[in-house]
């Protein structure tokens, strides 16, 4: 049987990094199987939490990431509808809940908040965790249905065996056994007729033929209850892959509510979707060997559920930045140029060769948002202090610098071929002739041309981009400043 996985986000208006990692892992598990199917299901039954436009964020994120679903609300498929609120309209969950009641796995409940809270208070005062002991369980189905016919409000609750245990195997957390008496008889259908997640996930995963349920480990403790529902229906249970949490630090989960970055925030900060996926794939999963840079297709090949760990993985923005930088440097120049042109245009208004600028920036920028700040010296020649010429590592001081600038000025003034290759040839001759190290000439020249200690590109690239006239003008200004 081919693998079928699903990503089942609730539309909240942003893509949480932990959720995106769940989507990615579910995708990888499906795609590892050549026949595998990856499904998108929108879980929007919590009507109180609905956010306008939120499903569009989900579609857009999936598309930006290349996580293409084979079945889903927008592309259709054989087991739709793929939006839970549409499934509610067809009466499907109610039908299965009533079936479950007949099978003994659920019951009607007419209790009001007051009765439930009264029990809660007593139990919590005893220091027990709350578990509702529902007197409605004693009603026959006919009695209950008569009350419903009379217009009484009701919910449907799961009925849990009072004794015995329930066990299952999780692919990540191993064999888990719980005593049934610890499981609460959760609500499956609310008084508004909508299913809870606790019921809808089981019905939908079954009807959609999901073979591997990939989801956050917050659902691990409820899984025995879901399995009791599968058993009551005599449905085959899926494999479970509960994912360890993505952490902000040792004690706190990464959460948008605490102001932590969502996928959209990271993209806005200049990270590439591919690099984000590459990084988050490894939050809690370790590839074999030392390879760290993976395209999505390479992840499909490399991913392996057995290498998912149980402990929470800390989201490290520094690591993400370094992976992003590698992704940027791995791009061919044409694609890179197309990507960064808006960032260059933002910082450089003058008539310079923007592609040449892209080429130097590519070697330095780890995120797209770093780019404008690196290019502030093209349009205007910034004021700088002569003390910057004093550099131990480069073995330069003001005297060495002045000598280098004068030599550079003299050589460049004679040149008409301003190609990078030619500038390279003529400038590299200078240190040889002066008996200096390359850095003793090229570092002062770079500073004299840019006014900055750190720049993308060296003296040769910068002179090439600035052009002859502007290069000589800046050298003259810098020489005058040193001679003062
Ligand atoms: N809608 C649930 C969530 O966003 C889905 C959990 C699941 O994958 O089953 O957490």
Image: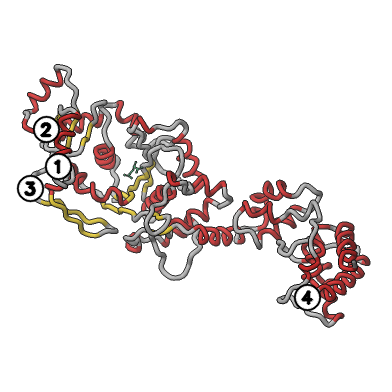
For the question of whether residue 35 can be seen, the reply is no
Q: Position of residue 345 (x, y in %)?
A: 72, 47
Q: Residue furthest front?
A: 125
Left or right side of 90 for 385 = right
- Whole-number angstrom distance, CA of label 2 to CA of label 3: 20 Å
The number of discs equals 4
Q: Give SS at disc 3.
A: loop
The disc placed on residue 396 is 4
Q: Give SS at disc 1.
A: helix
The disc placed on residue 123 is 1
Name the N-terminal-most of marks 1 and 3: 1
- Whole-number angstrom distance, CA of label 1 to CA of label 3: 19 Å
Say if 296 sits above or below 88 in the image.
below
Q: Is mark 2 within 8 Å of ligand 1?
A: no
Left or right side of 162 for 463 = right
Q: Which residue is mark 2?
A: 102
- Whole-number angstrom distance, CA of label 4 to CA of label 3: 83 Å
Q: Residues within 10 Å of mark 1 (few under 14, many from 20)?
A: some
């Amino acid at each position: 049987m081919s693998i079928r996985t699903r990503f089942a986000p609730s539309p909240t208006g942003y893509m949480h990094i932990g959720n995106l990692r769940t989507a990615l892992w579910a995708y990888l598990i499906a795609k590892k199987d050549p026949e595998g199917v990856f499904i998108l299901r929108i879980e929007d039954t919590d009507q109180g939490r609905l956010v306008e436009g939120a499903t569009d964020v989900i579609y857009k994120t999936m598309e930006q990431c290349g996580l293409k679903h084979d079945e889903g609300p927008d592309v259709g498929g054989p087991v739709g509808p793929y939006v839970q609120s549409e499934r509610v309209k067809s009466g499907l969950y109610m039908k299965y809940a009533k079936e479950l009641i007949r099978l003994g796995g659920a019951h009607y409940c007419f209790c009001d908040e007051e009765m439930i809270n009264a029990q809660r208070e007593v139990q919590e005062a005893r220091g027990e965790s709350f578990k509702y002991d529902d007197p409605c369980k004693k009603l026959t189905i006919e009695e209950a249905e008569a009350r419903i016919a009379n217009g009484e409000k009701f919910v449907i609750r799961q009925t849990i065996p009072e004794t015995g245990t329930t066990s299952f195997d999780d692919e990540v957390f191993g064999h888990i056994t719980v005593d049934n008496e610890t499981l609460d008889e959760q609500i499956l259908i609310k008084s508004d007729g909508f299913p809870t997640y606790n019921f809808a996930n089981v019905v939908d995963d079954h009807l959609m033929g999901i073979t591997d349920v990939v989801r956050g480990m917050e659902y691990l403790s409820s899984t025995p209850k879901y399995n009791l529902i599968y058993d009551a229906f005599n449905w085959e249970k899926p494999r479970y892959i509960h994912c360890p949490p993505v952490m902000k630090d040792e004690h706190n989960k990464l959460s948008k509510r605490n102001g932590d970055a969502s996928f959209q925030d990271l993209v806005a900060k200049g990270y590439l979707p591919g690099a984000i996926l590459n990084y988050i794939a490894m939050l809690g999963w370790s590839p074999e060997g030392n390879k760290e840079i993976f395209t999505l297709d390479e992840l499909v090949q490399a991913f392996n559920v057995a290498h998912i760990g149980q402990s929470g993985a800390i989201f490290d923005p520094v690591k993400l930045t370094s992976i992003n930088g590698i992704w940027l440097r791995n791009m061919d120049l044409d694609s890179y140029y197309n990507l960064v042109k808006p960032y260059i245009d933002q910082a450089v208004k003058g008539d310079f060769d923007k592609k040449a600028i892209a080429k130097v920036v590519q070697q330095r920028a780890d995120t797209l948002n770093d780019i404008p700040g690196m290019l502030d010296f093209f349009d205007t020649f910034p004021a700088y202090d002569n003390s910057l010429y004093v550099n131990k590592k480069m073995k330069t001081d003001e005297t060495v610098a002045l000598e280098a600038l004068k030599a550079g000025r003299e050589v460049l003034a004679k040149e008409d071929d301003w190609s990078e290759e030619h500038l390279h040839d003529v400038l590299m001759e200078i240190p040889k002739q002066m008996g200096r190290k390359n850095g003793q000439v090229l570092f002062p020249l770079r500073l004299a041309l840019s006014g900055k200690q750190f720049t993308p590109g060296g003296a040769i690239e910068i002179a090439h981009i600035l052009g002859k006239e502007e290069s000589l003008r800046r050298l003259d200004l810098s020489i005058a400043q040193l001679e003062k």
